[in-house]
Image: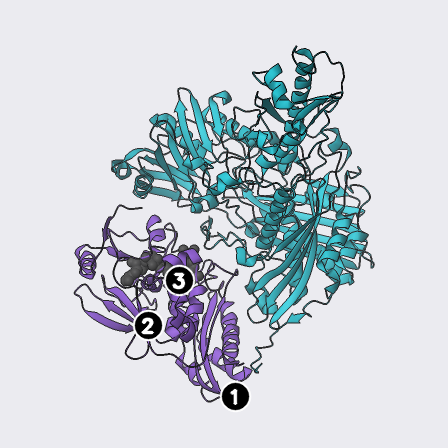
Amino acid sequence: MKPFTYQRAGELRDALAGAAGTANAKFISGGTNLLDLMKLEIERPAHLVDINHLPFNGIEETAEGGLRIGAQVRNSTLAADSRIRSDYPVLAQALLAGASAQIRNKASTGGNLLQRTRCYYFYDRNMPCNKRKPGSGCAALHGFNRMHAVLGSSDTCIAVHPSDMAVAMTLLDASVETMDTEGVTRQIPIGDLHRLPGTTPDIETQLKPGEMITAVILPPVQPGRHIYRKVRDRASYAFALVSVAAIVDVAGETITGARFALGGVAAKPWRTPEAEAILLGEKVSTEVFQRAAEIALANAIGRGGNDFKIPLAKRTVQHALAAASQRG
Amino acid sequence: MSNSTPMANTGKTWIGQPIDRVDGALKVTGEAVYAYEHRADDPVTYGYILGAGIARGRISAIDTAQAEAMPGVLCVMTHKNAPAQPAFGPAVTPAVREVFARPRPVLSTDRVRYYDEPVALVVAETFEAARGAAGLIAIEYEDERGAYDLSRHLADAYAPQRTNAGFQTDSLVGDFEAAFADSDVKVDAIYTTPYEHHNPMEPHATLAAWSGDEVTIYTSAQTLANFQAGIANTLQIPPDKVHLVSRFIGGGFGSKLIVHADTILAALAARELQRPVKIALTRQQMFANAGHRAKMIQSVRLSADRDGKLTGIAHDVCSATSRFEEFCEQTAVFARSLYAAPNRITRHRLVGLDTNRGEWMRSPGEAPGMLAFECAMDELADQIGIDPIELRILNEPEVDPERNVPFSTRNLVACMQEGARRFGWEQRQAGPGTVRDGRKLIGLGMAAAIRPNYLGASAARIGIDGNGRVKVELDMTDIGTGTYTILAQIAATSLGLPLSAIDVQLGDSHFPRTAGSGGSWGAASAGSAVHNACEALKQKIAKVAKEVPGSPFYGSNLDRTEFANGEIRIGDRSANLATLIKRVAPQGLDAQGAVEAAGENYRNYSQHAYGAHFVEIEVDLDTAEMRVSRMLSVIGAGRILNPKTARSQIIGGMVWGIGAALMEESVLDPRYGHFVNHDLAEYHVPVNADVPDLDVFFLEEPDNNANVFGSKGIGELGVCGAGAAVANAVFNATGVRVREFPITLDKILPGMPVETSRANRS
Ligand SMILES: Cc1cc2nc3c(=O)[nH]c(=O)nc-3n(C[C@H](O)[C@H](O)[C@H](O)COP(=O)(O)OP(=O)(O)OC[C@H]3O[C@@H](n4cnc5c(N)ncnc54)[C@H](O)[C@@H]3O)c2cc1C
Ligand code: SF4
């Protein structure tokens, strides 16, 4: 681990000043991802700003009827919140499907969104990796790429974003509230937070250096049945091979609202508006769900080891939509 | 075994009782001190090993200046300045035994033989400084093209001189090829079993501290004798100058039978610096530097008549190993004893690659071998249309089919029948893919288990003091299996004392030498030594009791002596044992006992432990996720010394079976020669949620040819065949036979019914 300086920020302005004052500063929250990466010298910050003591640990109702989740709210706290459980069950389910109880107790809302890929080659400094070392190549492209992306990837990088929580938040059309080093705040639709790799997979989000996530804002409750289905290699404590968050609302036999997001398939949670659109007004049927799944995966590209994700994602979408449309 | 008249104990027998671990409280309260937690008299320094970034080649330049300049750094050791060590030597040692003792030099040449092989050691005042400085070492390599992929180098396969544990490489009986060619009922299947890693919770770790010309090594070792020899031979010092301490071990599974780089480097650096040095492998480093199970391609061919009577068995195994040191897992050896058939072949071949070599991993041989073979038996049963248990019963041998000696005891058939009854095997539908529960396919599978039973030379020392307290000392280890507990049970039973009077001390090379923990022989070997030491002690006590004036037994010439309920009885007189010792031998008494390695009973009998595993699995119709829902193992392993610790061993093995069948795999990248998924986030072992309530039933049948207790080894038996039972259940559930382990969902998915989710309302 490379030596670094450490600052425990008591006030927001100290944190922002700390981040602005040193080149290559990093915020540290739960540290469950950052510390692992620092030990392996994949992250090599010169300065750490500890933001755990900032007053961002509340879950408040917004004027619009949604919820504002402070960036420091722990994954376990969020999953246990009664409003989340009753009104946004897909989010509670996604959180509980992630990591382990111990990690969820530490993991923060902001840190979860900004956790980095689990690509094996990214984790090994002897391997070429364009994300870790731009221009060095992508060892996964022709390597062991069972966990990798089938949507939105490029020949430069095929990594996936590993968060479960982010998939549910993307489904819910959440937005991310940030503050830059000047103290200026903005809201970013969560779907725009993460970038696709293109030719610059090292740039993962729209955030500017030193810009801090302060909260995630959920819009009002979505009617319908919520489902988070995570497919993985073991029953717990494994990242998603494919996951699907879905909400379907039905009146009688007719779909009156439907949306779904995929995890484990791209560098960001993946939604396909065209696929959601075809469901509206349709009768509940295997065929219509199958059609939606086909559209969602229409542009999928397998890289060898991950080819199975394409049929798996289709089957899981169908299954999740079917489950979310069941009543009674 | 002692030939003197055994001293009877008619009181309470602790043997066979489900006693809680005597070291349990120490462990759960954090009082048990593990290798890396030890302190030395002088302030400890910390080492960090830097591994090679290539898998084969030469270090052409190495610059350590920046690392040396880092505050707190005490030394940077590379091949340029490491103390002289003997050369590594040939890939195969002349004798089996030498593999455990050979010098294992580290940082001694500029050659890189495998990925992440140690190329430098940094020692500093803190671990962080050492690790930080290691990141500042600049190395240039001459990278050579290596061979890493077993399947691409099959043409280089060769026949080794012997397998691990000294078995014959090949066995041939009758004319298999002719029998196979003539048969209309046959299985001809290729299975691949992947690289696997043990990953005990406690990594390989050592604290080395010198005092004059003697070094004390606190480490995590299964067998102290091997470590003592390995260190002495590498450092070229006399073995009696190497003191090993390994009292608590956080799991071994075979990965701690011999010294690894942490131990050698700590000893070398501590001598150079004249300060204690601590080194642990990181979890990632353990994948390259602490042994593994090698990848294998296994061909199993079976021929049978139409009723299922086997006419031929052929098990051909080709395994990866390293070029610089051979390890041939005895993968097909079990098949020499399991089923009857007139025509038989078992063969082992190796391909030398530019990787580290495999080592002993729990159930070497049976674990990968039975995973393949017991699936082939299931394939045969399916083909003939006969119940898999019936098929096995039909081929039950009368005597060991290749050695032609009788079995000492063998209750495989009883295990299968008892298991079938307990598990509800009759519910199994022979037609695969036919049982559904909601959106799950349900399947049942079974497999047999066999594992040879061993006995290794061991000795123990025992002493009783004037307070009636007993101390038992031997260099045996408890790797989490319960050795402390069963040895206390054995001593307490023999001496007729309460368990609380017995203090068992293990894991110190100053104690009498044992065979250590490995090959499931620990309980039998160390236990027999303790038993014999107790017998010797009792003889001594009786003698003194009769000879010392003032003893209540003074002058007695009776032979019949009993030790029970804290008393000694000679003839019709009895006395409290502690009081007697205080009176007749106030300084206490001690004695030694020993047991020889497996002898005549092993030559004249075929000794194995047996079992039958039963599995129910649920396979998700939509996603092909597989989860075991029920599992039972019925175990025939002679007399059970402690049903509680024994059960823990078996369920641990069953979990290994689930892992081997469904998820465990270290993926080797054939371009770079490294294990890609080298951490516990991506090397998947079963977690609690993958493991249902496991059921174990012991069919006890003392084996009087095995040892004084009639017990047989159980540490590895639970793994044997367990994975095949899972795989056979997957086939029964889905109709998909996957022969490339592990059976991950992507391999099942293409064969799953194309039927789509039901959208209809419930
Ligand atoms: C073994 C293992 C298994 C796991 N399994 C799963 C899983 O199945 N599903 C899943 O979703 N996750 C999983 N995780 C990941 C886990 O959810 C993340 O590590 C965690 O959410 C990160 O949160 P943190 O607060 O600890 O972040 P940190 O490690 O503190 O930070 C992560 C990154 O975010 C930045 N950061 C943190 N907070 C802010 C902020 N407010 N503003 C700006 N930047 C910020 C940091 O600088 C850093 O770059 C797993 C992790 C491990 C170790
Ligand atoms: S997929 Fe991305 S993260 Fe992985 S090796 Fe390629 S560039 Fe690096």
Q: Nearer the viewer, mark 1 or mark 2?
A: 1
The residue indicated by pointer 3 is A76
Task: For the residues labelled 1 and 2, say whether their Cβ atoms are less than 8 Å apart.
Answer: no
Tell me which numbered mark, 1 or 2, is placed earlier along the sequence: 2
Task: State the image quarter where residue B445 is shown.
Answer: bottom right
Of the 4 image quadrants, the one containing the N terminus of chain B is top right
Q: Which of A8 and B563 lies nearest the eye of the viewer?
A: B563
Q: Is residue B714 visible?
A: yes
Tell me the element at label 1.
loop
Quick check: B316 left or right of A118? right
Residue A180: where, in percent of width, then height?
Answer: 20, 65
Do marks 1 and 3 both belong to one polypeptide chain?
Answer: yes
Q: Which mark is residue B152?
A: none
Of the 4 image quadrants, the one containing the C terminus of chain B is bottom right
Tell me the element at label 3.
helix
Q: Chain of mark 2?
A: A
Quick check: B410 left or right of B252? right
Q: Is residue B747 above or below residue B393?
A: below
Q: Residue at x 56, y 16 (%)?
A: B587
The residue indicated by pointer 1 is A253
Tell me the element at label 2.
helix
Q: Which of B318 and A18 lies nearest the eye of the viewer?
A: A18
Tell me which numbered mark, 3 or 2, is placed earlier along the sequence: 3
Q: Kindly indicate which chain is depicted in purple in the rendered structure.
A: A
The residue indicated by pointer 2 is A190
The crowd level at tag 1 (other Cα within 10 Å; few <14, some 14-19, many 20+) is: some
Q: Amino acid at mark 3?
A: Ser
Q: Amino acid at mark 1?
A: Glu
Q: Is residue A45 above or below residue B499?
A: below
Q: Chain of mark 1?
A: A
Task: For the residues labelled 1 and 3, say whether their Cβ atoms are less than 8 Å apart.
Answer: no
Chain B colour? cyan
